[in-house]
Image (cartoon, rainbow, N blue to C red):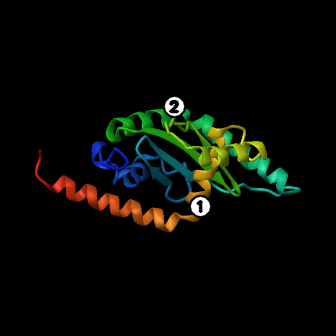
C-alpha cells in the first residue's frame, strides 16, 4: 500500500470545521475560522476584528497587528487549551492555533513532525544547493521549502488527489471487515 497509511486509521474529522465553529466563542473571530486537518494536527486560524486608528506607515500597522494577535493569544490561552483538549480527545489529533489581522498571520503551538526519508544523490544535491545558496539553513529547511513550493504550484492537483483518497477510504469503510 503506497503511503503506508490511510485516513480510515484515524477518527474521522470531517465535521471538525463545524465543531469548532459551534464551540469557539463568538467574540473571538470575525467570520468562520479556517480549519485545516491532516494526520497529526488540526490548525484553527481566525480573523481578528480590524484595528481602529491610523498608522504612520505599513511597518507601524504590521507592529500593531502583531501586538493585537499577541494580546489575543494571551487573553484566550486557558480557554484555547480547554477547547484543544476536547478536540484532541474527539479527533485524535493535536490542535494548533493562529490568528490573522490585516496583512499579518501568526501561527502558534504548531507541530514540527519528523519525517524519515531516504534520498538519492540527485535529490540530496538539490537540497545542498538550496543550503549553499542561503535559501535554507539546513537540508530539513530546504526540504520543507521544496514541499511548500510544490504545494503552492500544485494545489488543484493535490486537492483532486486528496478527494480521490477520501473516496477510497469511504469505499474501504463500507466493505467487509477482514
Residue 10 appears in view: yes
Along the line of sight, the residue nearer the viewer: 74 or 98: 98
Graded by Cα atoms within 10 Å as few (under 14), some (14 to 19) or many (20 or more), the crowding at tag 1 reads few
State which quadrant residue 175 falls in.
bottom left
Observer-side mark, 1 or 2, equals: 1
Q: Which tag, 1 or 2, sits closer to the chain's start?
A: 2
Q: Position of residue 43 (x, y in %)?
A: 50, 46
Query: Is residue 57 rendered to the left or right of residue 109?
Result: right
Q: Mark 2 falls on what kind of element?
A: helix
Along the line of sight, the residue nearer the viewer: 158 or 23: 158
- Which quarter of the image is occupied by the C terminus? top left
Along the line of sight, the residue nearer the viewer: 130 or 100: 130
Q: Position of residue 154 (x, y in %)?
A: 54, 64
What residue lies at 60% left-to-right and 53% top-to-bottom?
Answer: 148
What residue lies at 79% left-to-right and 56% top-to-bottom?
Answer: 53
What residue lies at 21% left-to-right and 59% top-to-bottom?
Answer: 171
Whether residues under marks 1 and 2 lie with C-beta atoms below 8 angstroms apart, the answer is: no
As displayed, is residue 74 above or below residue 134? above
As displayed, is residue 80 above or below residue 152? above
- Give how far apart the Cα atoms at labels 1 and 2 are: 34 Å
Residue where numbered disc 1 is placed:
152
Query: Is residue 44 rendered to the left or right of residue 129?
Result: left
State the mark number for residue 78: 2
Query: Is residue 64 rendered to the left or right of residue 94?
Result: right
State which quadrant residue 41 falls in.
top left
Which residue ends up furthest to the right in the rendered image? 56
Q: Mark 1 falls on what kind of element?
A: helix
Along the line of sight, the residue nearer the viewer: 103 or 142: 142
Q: Position of residue 20 (x, y in %)?
A: 42, 49
Amino acid at each position: 500500500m503506497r503511503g503506508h497509511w490511510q485516513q480510515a486509521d484515524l477518527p474521522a474529522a470531517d465535521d471538525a470545521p463545524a465543531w469548532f465553529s459551534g464551540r469557539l466563542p463568538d467574540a473571538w473571530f470575525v467570520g468562520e475560522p479556517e480549519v485545516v486537518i491532516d494526520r497529526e494536527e488540526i490548525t484553527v486560524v481566525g480573523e481578528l476584528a480590524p484595528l481602529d486608528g491610523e498608522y504612520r506607515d505599513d511597518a507601524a500597522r504590521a507592529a500593531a497587528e502583531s501586538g493585537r494577535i499577541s494580546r489575543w493569544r494571551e487573553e484566550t490561552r486557558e480557554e484555547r487549551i480547554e477547547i484543544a483538549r476536547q478536540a484532541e480527545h474527539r479527533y485524535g489529533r493535536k490542535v494548533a492555533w493562529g490568528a490573522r489581522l490585516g496583512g499579518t498571520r501568526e501561527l502558534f503551538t504548531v507541530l514540527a513532525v519528523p519525517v524519515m526519508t531516504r534520498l538519492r544523490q540527485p535529490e540530496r544535491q538539490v537540497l545542498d544547493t538550496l543550503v549553499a545558496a542561503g535559501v535554507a539553513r539546513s537540508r530539513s529547511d530546504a526540504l520543507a521549502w521544496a514541499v511548500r513550493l510544490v504545494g503552492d504550484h500544485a494545489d488543484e492537483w493535490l486537492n483532486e488527489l486528496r478527494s480521490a483518497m477520501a473516496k477510497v477510504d469511504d469505499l474501504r469503510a463500507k466493505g467487509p471487515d477482514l
